[in-house]
Image (spheres, helix red, strand yellow):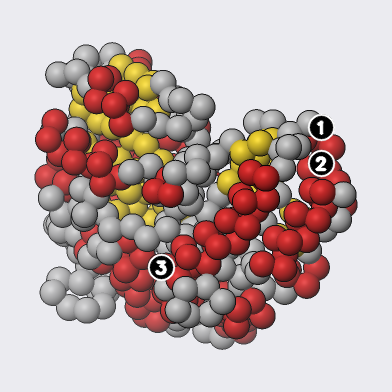
Amino acid sequence: MAGKKSLSHLRRYFPLTKKCIYLNNASEGPLPLSAKRVMEKFLYDSSYTENEHDPESFRIVEEVREKCARLIKAKSSEIALTTNTSYGLNLVCRGLGLKSGDEILLPEVEFPANVYPWLNLRSEGIRVKFIKTENGFFDISRFHDAITPETRVFSVSFVQFLNGYKNDLKALGEICKQKDIFFVVDGIQGVGNQVLDVKESEVDLLSCGGHKWLLSPPGTGFVYLSSEAKRSLGTPFSGWLSVDWCQGKKKPDFTNLLRYDLKPFETARRFEFGSYPFLDIRGFDACLDMLLSAGIKNIEKHNRRLLKLLIDHINSSSRYELKSSLEEKHLSSIINFTGPGIGRLHSKLRQKGIVTSLREAGIRVSPHFYNNLTEIKKLIEVLES
Ligand SMILES: Cc1ncc(COP(=O)(O)O)c(C=O)c1O
């Protein structure tokens, strides 16, 4: 169906597809049955068996780091598991040792998760500057113009949450490198549906929650910190699991917990502080397996094909107007359109079993690899009825 590899066989893992047409991944992804199964088994074992699954749980944590790394072409030593996007963004805010007079640049259309942690630094004399956009599309020349000698950090979404505008991370990363600006990316709306090579894009830190495009339980996520950028980031927080209980071995050894002489991990794992949500991480693991076996490139092509049908329809319609960019390199798995009586249309779609989001006077449509063209055609039928 899409690209070289058909993804239709994965639809059976999503029972929700029998109940409705779910086109709302940008809000929350449905949990696949494969993840539900491993989570149920863990719950069963937690109630009925002795609590001896720790070594297995730690092994899964290692694997999940490695799988997150594969999603963005990083190394597993550059990944720390977190609980949401905000965790990684707060980490970088606090870890960079910013001083009074330093400047942070943000596009004016960031999701609040990538705004409030920075605003929280203003009480320390750090300035937050918002860069204007054209209709919500971030323009590189405006970024260029906004940079001053005080600019220390630029933080931006991989994919904008309202209109799906995919930022050109490679071009932005190049500028940040030239100007010695720490480059932070909020990855949640793009990772899992768009190909990304964090090395090629010179990203210093990327933070991503698992509950949207990674289809994982809420409370999962990861942060990537490039080995090169590690030097710039201190350890603003630390905990008993930030230090190296492995001592050169594969498994941690917790038999002498009263030793306080252990060093933080050399890897990004130093940003994991305490006990893990092992249940959620098991679900996360199963979802990552599904995404990686489907292939992000295939997913990107598939989702693009679905949205192209809708875009073509909206472009030929006199009733609706696209709020998303049509430039190929800025397309993602999210589009937004508007028209008269948009609130009523959103409710009508819901009544007909089609789930989308009403965002800023537009309808946001965000399909994933388990959706198909028939579903998009049904959406178009309702738009025309
Ligand atoms: C771009 C973006 N960043 C972050 C978030 C959420 O942040 P967190 O994972 O910390 O809840 C969302 C949506 O909920 C989002 O659209």
Q: Is residue 320 left or right of residue 25?
A: right
In this rendering, the answer to whether 15 lies above or below 202 is: below
- Amino acid, disc 1: Gly
**Residue 343 position in % (x across, y down):** 79, 35
Q: Nearer the viewer, residue 317 or 91?
A: 317
- Amino acid, disc 3: Lys
- The residue indicated by pointer 1 is 341
Does the residue at mark 1 contact the one at mark 2 (Cβ under 8 Å)? yes
Residue in the image at 27% along x and 64% along y: 73
**Residue 150 position in % (x across, y down):** 18, 19
**Residue 191 position in % (x across, y down):** 42, 56
Quadrant housing residue 42: bottom right
Q: Nearer the viewer, residue 370 or 6?
A: 6
In this rendering, the answer to whether 303 lies above or below 153 is: below
Question: Mark 3 or mark 2, which has the lower sequence index?
Answer: 3
- The residue indicated by pointer 2 is 345
- Name the element at disc 2: helix
Q: Is residue 127 left or right of residue 9?
A: left
Check disc 1: other Cα within 10 Å, few if <14, some if 14-19, many if 20+.
few
- Res. 297 mark: 3
Does the residue at mark 3 contact the one at mark 2 (Cβ under 8 Å)? no
Residue in the image at 73% along x and 61% along y: 377
Q: Is residue 277 left or right of residue 43?
A: left
Q: Is residue 274 left or right of residue 311?
A: left
- Name the element at disc 1: loop
- Amino acid, disc 2: Leu
Residue in the image at 48% along x and 80% along y: 5
Check disc 3: other Cα within 10 Å, few if <14, some if 14-19, many if 20+.
some
Quadrant housing residue 25: bottom right
